[in-house]
Image: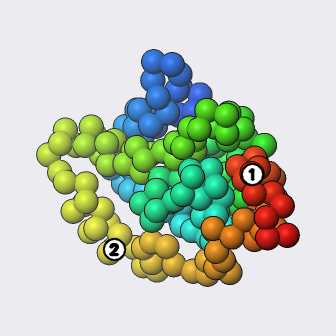
Amino acid sequence: MHTSEFWTIIESARSAAGPDKPFHEALVDELTTHSEEAIFRYQERFDDVHDAVYRWDVWAAAYLIGGGCSDDSFIDFRAGLIALGRDWYEKAAACPDNLAEHPAVIAAVGATDYDAIFYEDVNYAADGAFECVTGGDKDFDTAWTQYAASREGYSGHESGDMGEDFDFDDSAEMHRRLPRLAALYLRDTAHQGS
């Protein structure tokens, strides 16, 4: 599946989502209109897009927005970036500090909403769609493992250079690297360590 096809699926689900249908449910519905093979190709591209933002600077943004960020939470944060759609995903991938402009991130500051952007259920959309398409007769994980093994050159998850590691608890460093997000989330520490 080409990247543009992947983002078309995401945008279709975003358009179908609403107050009575959360995005992850709309995404499962969208994927159920595709074949098993297409669901696997979606999952493969999802992994690629998800892994592309497996970087320290993106993790630092998640750490600020979430008031901390474990390994598992970072998986959910990256899924949430995808759920924001291609435009916001690409803005965050180019510079995670751009998330300081996103309405959900801004709203989360005053509401202490530590779940802004984090979206666990998006990680399992292909699994849910596969179950619907197969009537639950096949196990997604087993079928996915077989599919992934058959894909020449498919590397799996989270490979590559994460960039420079740095101390997320060093407020001066966070202000230097993510100035707009730090201004939102570290207001009380704006001048410490400077």
Q: Residues within 10 Å of mark 1 (few under 14, many from 20)?
A: few
Please state which of residues 186 and 98 is positioned toward the viewer in this rendering.
Answer: 186
- Quadrant in which residue 189 is drawn: bottom right
Provide the secondary structure element on which disc 2 rests: helix
The label number, if any, that marks residue 188 in the structure image: 1
Q: Amino acid at mark 1?
A: Asp
Is residue 177 visible in the rendered image? The answer is no
Q: Residues within 10 Å of mark 2 (few under 14, many from 20)?
A: few
In the picture, measured across the screen, residue 97 lies left or right of residue 143, that is right
Q: Which of marks 1 and 2 precedes in the sequence?
A: 2
Image position, residue 75 (x, y; %): 47, 59
Q: Amino acid at mark 2?
A: Ser
Is residue 50 visible in the rendered image? The answer is yes
- 83 above or below 13? below
Report the residue marked by disc 2.
150
Instruction: Check the image and name the residue furthest to the top.
Output: 20
Query: Which residue is located at x 60 percent, y 64 percent?
Result: 59
Image position, residue 77 (x, y; %): 53, 53
Image position, residue 65 (x, y; %): 62, 50
- Quadrant in which residue 117 is drawn: top right
Please state which of residues 122 and 174 is positioned toward the viewer in this rendering.
Answer: 174
In the picture, measured across the screen, residue 186 lies left or right of residue 84, that is right
Alpha-carbon span between mark 2 and mark 1: 52 Å
Query: Which residue is located at x 69 percent, y 70 percent?
Result: 170
Instruction: Check the image and name the residue furthest to the left.
Output: 137
In the picture, measured across the screen, residue 28 lies left or right of residue 83, that is left
Provide the secondary structure element on which disc 1 rests: helix
The label number, if any, that marks residue 120 in the structure image: none
Query: Which residue is located at x 25 percent, y 43 percent?
Result: 131
